[in-house]
């Protein structure tokens, strides 16, 4: 399918943002939630910061769990210590405990043209609760009846949970607590009720039984979720053979719900693919892409903090172009990029 990477990619880089905390550096700006609001495109950027490095130690930041005051403290580990495992740059394991090598928060950016963004100088949402001890990550936004609902991963020593927040104006934000307990992430909300219920895609971690798969759940009020139904699993040997998870908020089209999801293969290369779900029953898959829509190819996707990753959390109508979409994505867990595609091409790719 014809996809056009924006010539201005990466649109946002770590150096565009000042560290929020003294003594920290911005490692990555990536995986933004996306929504259109009053003629603007709004991104909720995941900013990952880490304590400035010191020679001979790995420094890990986390919320000060004893005092519920949003303060962080830093623990230092020696990479030479046999009990320390830091093979994956994203995490550090020590004595049966897993930590993150960076701490993320959510930052708001606005744009009228979808390309140039005004980035706020104040955080939109900071880690605050014990379940957010290691940070908050990978938001998604769905506008339901004029209210913007934000789902995000809350990471702590208790695991990765998904929390919900809501805002009407992107100024004030209200936390509604954890809606899916650990281990569960990649939660996206359908923008309207289906058959009288709110619906979400979610991704429980089912290790060691099977690879993490996508599920559906329903709710009367967006807070209490039940009626869980299996949707689809990774396909070993294919581009989405390792792990999968929902990406964009499902988009209502003439042919059904279009969902762009991520799939990692067994070598941890992250790609994006298209899914079409039946309009009246999102548990019925009309189409699932055999080939990815977007795969790491550009230099900024092949090399970064975690290489070979494209990961989306949202898309929007391209400003001024009714028939065109702009899909935002995190590239190599370091940058924010976007591609343009037409609705027609997207729907055509789903017709089997
Ligand atoms: C996980 C999440 C994402 C990240 C990918 C690739 O799925 O932590 O935030 O982009 O891994 O590292």
Image: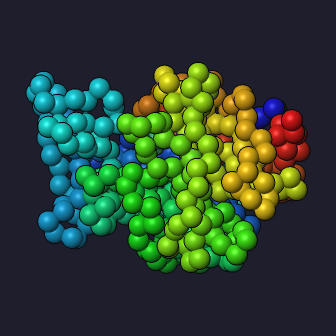
**Side (left or right) of 63 relative to 256:** left
Residue 94 x %, y %: 17, 37
Provide residue 179's location: percent of width, then percent of height: 45, 66
Instruction: Determine the residue positioned at 57% across, 64% down.
Output: 227
Write down the quadrant of residue 93 in the picture: top left
- Residue ID at (73%, 46%): 285
Q: Relative to residue 222, is residue 68 drawn left or right? A: left
Of 231 and 160, which appears nearest the observer? 231
Residue closest to the eye, 345 or 278: 278
Q: Is residue 326 visible in the rendered structure shown here?
A: no
Q: Quadrant of the C terminus?
A: top right
In the figure, 200 relative to 160: above or below? Answer: below
Q: Residue at x 16, y 69 (%)?
A: 67
Residue 348 drawn above or below residue 123: above
Q: Is residue 254 visible?
A: yes
What residue is shown at x 50% (from left), y 24% (from top)? 266
Image coordinates of residue 336 in percent, x first then y, are: 56, 43
Quadrant in the picture for the N terminus: top right
Determine whether, in the image, residue 169 is placed left or right of residue 280.
left
Corner quadrant of residue 141: bottom right
Tell me if residue 85 comes above or below residue 317 in the rendering. Answer: above
Q: Residue 348's x, y, as percent?
A: 88, 39
Q: Is 266 situated left or right of 196 in this image? A: left
């Amino acid at each position: 399918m014809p996809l056009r990477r924006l010539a201005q990619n990466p649109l946002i880089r770590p150096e565009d943002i000042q560290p929020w905390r003294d003594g920290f550096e911005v490692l990555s700006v990536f995986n933004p939630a996306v929504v259109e609001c009053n003629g603007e495109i709004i991104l909720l950027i995941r900013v990952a910061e880490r304590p400035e490095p010191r020679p001979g130690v790995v420094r890990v930041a986390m919320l000060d769990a004893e005092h519920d005051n949003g303060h962080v403290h830093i623990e230092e580990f020696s990479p030479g210590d046999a009990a320390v495992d830091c093979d994956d740059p994203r995490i550090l394991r020590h004595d049966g405990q897993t930590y993150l090598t960076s701490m993320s928060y959510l930052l708001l950016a606005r744009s009228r043209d979808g390309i140039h963004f005004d980035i706020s100088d104040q955080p939109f949402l900071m880690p605050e609760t014990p379940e957010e001890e290691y940070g908050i990550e990978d938001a998604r936004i769905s506008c339901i009846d004029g209210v913007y609902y934000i789902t995000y991963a809350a990471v702590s020593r208790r695991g990765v949970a998904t929390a919900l927040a809501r805002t009407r104006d992107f100024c004030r934000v209200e936390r509604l607590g954890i809606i899916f307990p650990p281990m569960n992430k990649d939660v996206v909300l359908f923008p309207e009720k289906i058959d009288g219920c709110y619906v979400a895609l979610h991704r429980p971690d089912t290790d060691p039984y099977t690879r993490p798969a996508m599920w559906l759940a329903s709710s009367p009020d967006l807070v209490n979720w039940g009626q869980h139904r299996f949707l689809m699993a990774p396909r070993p040997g294919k581009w989405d053979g390792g792990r999968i998870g929902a990406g964009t908020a499902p988009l209502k089209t003439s042919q059904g719900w279009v969902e762009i999801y991520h799939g990692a293969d067994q070598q941890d290369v992250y790609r994006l693919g298209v899914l079409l779900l039946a309009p009246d029953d999102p548990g019925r898959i009309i189409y699932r892409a055999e080939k990815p829509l977007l795969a790491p190819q550009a230099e900024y996707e092949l090399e970064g903090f975690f290489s070979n990753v494209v990961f989306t959390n949202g898309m929007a109508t391209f400003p001024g172009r009714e028939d065109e979409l702009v899909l935002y994505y995190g590239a190599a867990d370091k940058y924010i990029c976007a591609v343009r595609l037409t609705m027609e091409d997207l729907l055509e790719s789903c017709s089997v």
